[in-house]
Every structure is written in C-alpha cells, then in structure tokens.
Image (cartoon, rainbow, N blue to C red):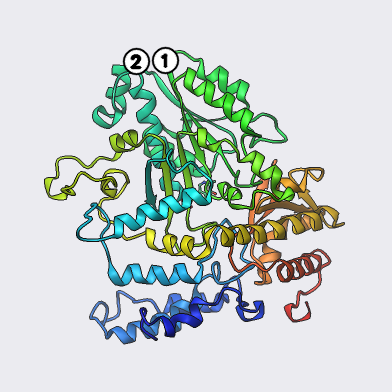
C-alpha cells in the first residue's frame, strides 16, 4: 500500500467522489458464511499458541482475508439505509488515517507544541458556518464521540445551569447536595419524540430515565412539542426543567417546533422559569445545510429556524457529515457552564501555560486524553464546503422524497406517519409499512435478505414499520431510486429480486 503522505499515490482513492456510480457497488451485508468463518478464525484461548505473538504482516493478512470480508457494508454501500449511519467521505477517511499515524493526544491546548487544538477550533467554526449558526454565539464547543455523548453533555450542562440559577453548583456539590441547598426537589427533562439516548443521558447524569417526560402535541404527531403542556410543567413549584427539543425525530425525521414563533415562545417560557433548552439535532440540523433559496426546502428551513435561541446543541459527525466513527459535536452559548461541568481541576502538569483563547479540551469535554478527532471533520468541511454539503444533503433529500412519493402511490405500501402529509416535510427519513399484514410482519427481513438494500425495523403506533434513512455521500438519486423501487415491488409481489435486471 502506498504511503499515506504520498498524495499522488493516494489520489485514486481520494478522488472516488464523482466517479461513475457503477464502480461503487457494494453489498449491504456480508454473506453469513463469511461472518461465521471470521468468527472461527478468532484466537482460541485453548490453543497452545494463544497470545504467543505473531508477525505484524501475518496479523494484517488475517485481518484482510478473514475479518474485513465479514464486516458490514454500512459505509461502503449507497443503499445501506439502516439507522442513520452516514458514510465516510474519501478525504475524511484519509484524514482519519493521518490521525492514527500522528497519534496526537488532544487534551491540553499547547499552541507552541501542536496546532491540533487550533484545527479543532477551526473545524467547529466551519461547522457553525455550514449550519448557519451564529459563530459568535456558540463559544462553548467540543468534539465528542457522537450524539449520545453530546446529549450527556447537554443534560449535564442543563442540570448545572438550572440548579446554579437557584444558588448551588452540581459540579461542586453533586446532585443531592446542590439540589438540597438550592431547594430543588426534582429536575425534569421535557421533550417530544426524544431519542432513546436522551433517557440514557438522563441516567448517566443522575437525573434518571424517569425524569424524561414526553409532551406530545397530538397522538398523530407525537414528535411535536406541546408548548402549553411545557408551560404547565415549568410552573410546578420546586421543580427545575431542561427542555430537549428533537430536531429530527428518529422515526419520522420530524421537528419538535414548527417555526421561529414557536421558538420565541419556548425561549420566553424557559427564561421566565430559568429552564435550559437543549437541541438534539444529531442529523436533523443538517437540513440547514440545504440551499436556502430553493422553494422545495422552504418548509424544512422554516422548521429548523430558531435554533440559535437554544442553550446547547447536539450534532453528529459520523452521520450526515460523513466522517468515520466516532465523531460528534457539542455546542453551548454558555461556555462557563460547560467548564463548571467538565473542569479537570488541580492538575498543574496539565495546564496549558498560556492565557488561551481556546480552552483545553480536557476542561470542556468528557475525556482527558483523546484522539485528534477533529481532523476528519476538518478535512471534510474544507473539501466539501457549503456547496458540497448542500449537494450531498440535496441528493439524500431528493432520494427520500422520490421514495416517499413512490410509497404513497404504491398499491402495496403505505407511507407513514400520514399519507396525506406534505412530502416537503421529508428530509432524509422515510417511514412505511406493507398494506398486507403478513407481508408487513416479514418485510424488514425480506428486504434485507436481498443484500442490495438495508433498512431498519421499527414500530409505529403499535405496528411494525420500516424505516429508510438516507445519509451516505455515495447516494445517486436515479440509480438508487431505480433499484429500491424495483426491489420493493419484487418483495411485495413475492418475486426474486435480481439486481442485474434493474
Ligand atoms: C443517532 C442519534 C443519537 C445517538 O447518536 P450516536 O451517534 O449513536 O451516539 C441521538 N439523537 C438522535 C436524534 C440521533 O439520530
């Protein structure tokens, strides 16, 4: 393999973007027998040579021959629509290898020893620009391992802020001590269509999963936040509140708030009751990267307007940004709160030694030592720029909308959550089910068995449903639509699907 820093030798891989689609076909899942064979090739503790060591080249051959063929095609296939996995842009993949090669420990801002913290800062600034967030407004920011970690930071900051406003620091005294001192009897997390990781985050930061309260506006649109209910909950005496706004509910892609007027009302309520507003925008916030002046995206832009009024935001890197795992970002308008939560005190040897404009990552994030996680995001943002990401998000949205229309018109399938809903609400998630109950029960398995398309199963209003999430940079609107529509027709009509005939 050519050296990482020989750009000429790397160029074929770096320039994959824009190649004819045919050269990028890849199965979604590996054959099961290869997974079994790979599993059988793993070291066996009862083998006499166990842990006796072997040449690095032999290990590399084993990984190439046994392990790699048994890995999921989630990032290599343009039709892996499970979860929201994104892919890895070639330049981001390359930068990720540079990160491993240079093995920087990005924990302290040491401007005379490494440029790494400045690169992180530049990447976070570019991301704010891409998402059209006020660059001056989001001074508290850091890279995380993903949206779950960012949600942990969001709730931790919220917890710190809402108790601090009543006179005590959770970071110093702990939750029990601070709440007792501040006269807070309960901290609740008010949301609608909250991602499961929000409950996990609530557990980790000591609020408890039971603190997360769903306040849906209606049974038919459970992702929309009922602001009247929020107002009632905020008024409960002795209770402090964090409001978690879903910007991209995971089953429907729906936004909790309709427009900037709702944001203004929510901000007013939060200010009145000293509550914290956290946005989970893992993938949904990227609708803001779509071109602004296209009519077809006006509705999405309206839905995502007002985010600058939040106190903190979760963004995922390994989803829509299309950088390799693991990558997430966290932003807050109140850097002092993030420091109160994360400060790594009393370690003189970890001081940066300068009055820094960039805080040391160890004082604003979960980890101390950590990898140079920003470089792949930096590379991707620099390379794609605003037009590049606008185009990638456009491709994903257009494919999703074509599929939504196909499903709505199909005799076999039913578009969820509502056939009559405006296709302009669709960003990158499409939810549907089969009209035939028996087919619906087996639908996910039948689709995924083709290995030409992969979807996640979910449930919607007590029934099984299929969820398509389009998030890979390789998506080609026409090719993917042709394959997926033919495949879904074949599955519904009980015919064998042959990719060669599409
Ligand atoms: C994916 C996702 C998460 C969790 O993200 P990870 O990167 O898997 O930690 C949280 N919230 C939303 C809305 C998501 O889509």
Residue at the spot x=50%, y=43% of the render?
Answer: 133
Residue at image mark 2: 183
Against 197, residue 6 (above or below) is: below
Residue 238 image label:
1
Mark 1 CB near ligand 1 (8 Å cut): no
The numbered mark, 2 or 1, whose residue comes first in the sequence reads 2
x%, y% of residue 182? 32, 17
Quick one: 7 or 161, which is closer to the camera? 7
Task: Count neighbours of disc 1 (C-alpha within 10 A) and say few if under 14, some if 14 to 19, many if 20 or more.
Answer: few
Most extreme residue toward the top is 237
Residue 462, located in which quarter of the rendered image? top right
Assess mark 2: CB under 8 A from ligand 1? no
Marks 2/1: CA distance? 7 Å
Looking at the rendering, in which quadrant would you find the N terminus?
Answer: bottom left
The 10 Å Cα crowd at callout 2, few under 14, some 14 to 19, many 20 or more, is some
Which residue lies at the image location 65% right of the left edge and 34% below the top edge? 259
Q: Position of residue 326 (x, y in %)?
A: 42, 59
Q: Residue 73: x percent and y percent?
A: 55, 71
> In the structure shown, which secondary structural element does the residue marked by tag 2 occupy?
loop
Q: At x 54% / y 68%, what residue is drawn? A: 75
Q: Position of residue 6 (x, y in %)?
A: 37, 82
With respect to residue 377, does 245 lie above or below? Answer: above
Asked if residue 192 lies left or right of residue 371, the reply is: right
Drawn side of residue 176 relative to residue 468, left or right: left
Mark 1 element type: loop
Contact between labelled residues 1 and 2, with CB atoms less than 8 Å apart: yes
Foreground residue among 233 and 460: 233
């Amino acid at each position: 393999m050519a050296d990482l820093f020989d750009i000429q030798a790397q160029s074929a891989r770096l320039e994959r973007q824009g190649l004819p689609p045919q050269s990028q076909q890849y199965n979604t899942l590996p054959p099961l027998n290869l997974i079994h064979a790979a599993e059988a090739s793993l070291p066996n503790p009862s083998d006499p040579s166990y842990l006796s060591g072997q040449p690095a080249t032999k290990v590399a051959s084993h990984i190439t021959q046994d392990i790699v063929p048994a890995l999921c095609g989630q990032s290599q296939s343009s039709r892996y629509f499970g979860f929201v996995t994104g892919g890895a842009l070639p330049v981001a993949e390359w930068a990720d290898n540079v990160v491993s090669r240079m093995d920087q420990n990005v924990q302290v801002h040491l401007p005379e020893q490494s440029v790494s913290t400045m690169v992180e800062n530049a990447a976070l600034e570019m991301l704010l620009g891409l998402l059209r967030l006020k660059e001056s407004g989001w001074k508290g920011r850091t890279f995380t391992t993903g949206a779950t970690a960012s949600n942990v930071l969001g709730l931790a900051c919220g917890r710190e802020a809402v108790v601090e406003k009543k006179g005590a620091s959770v970071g110093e005294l702990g939750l029990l001590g601070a709440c007792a001192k501040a006269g807070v009897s309960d901290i609740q997390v008010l949301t609608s269509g909250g991602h499961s990781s929000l409950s996990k985050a609530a557990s980790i930061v000591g609020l408890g999963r039971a603190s997360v309260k769903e306040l849906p506006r209606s049974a038919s649109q459970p992702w929309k936040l009922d602001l009247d209910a929020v107002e009632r909950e905020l008024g409960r005496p002795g209770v402090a509140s964090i409001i978690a706004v879903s910007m991209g509910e995971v089953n429907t892609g729906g936004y909790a708030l309709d427009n900037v007027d709702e944001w203004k009302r929510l901000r007013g309520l939060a200010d009145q009751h000293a509550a914290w507003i956290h946005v989970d925008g893992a993938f949904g916030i990227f609708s803001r990267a779509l071109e602004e002046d296209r009519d077809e995206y006006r509705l999405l832009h309206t839905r995502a307007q007002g985010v600058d009024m939040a106190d903190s935001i979760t963004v995922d890197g390994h989803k829509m940004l299309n950088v390799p795992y693991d990558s997430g970002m966290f932003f807050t308008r109140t850097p002092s709160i993030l420091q109160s939560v994360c400060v790594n005190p009393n370690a003189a040897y970890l001081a940066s030694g300068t009055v820094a404009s960039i805080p040391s990552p160890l004082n604003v994030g979960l980890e101390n030592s950590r990898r140079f996680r920003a470089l792949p995001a930096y590379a991707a943002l620099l390379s794609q720029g605003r037009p590049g990401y606008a185009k990638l998000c456009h491709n994903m949205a257009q494919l999703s909308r074509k599929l939504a229309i196909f499903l709505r018109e199909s005799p076999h399938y039913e578009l969820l959550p509502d056939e009559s809903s405006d296709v302009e609400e669709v960003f990158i998630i499409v939810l549907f089910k089969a009209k035939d109950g028996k087919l619906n029960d087996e639908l996910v398995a039948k689709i995924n068995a083709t290995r030409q398309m992969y979807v996640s199963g979910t449930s919607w209003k007590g029934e099984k449903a299929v969820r398509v999430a389009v998030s890979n940079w390789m998506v080609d609107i026409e090719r993917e639509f042709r394959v997926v529509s033919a495949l879904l027709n074949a599955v519904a009509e009980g015919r064998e699907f042959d990719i060669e005939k599409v």
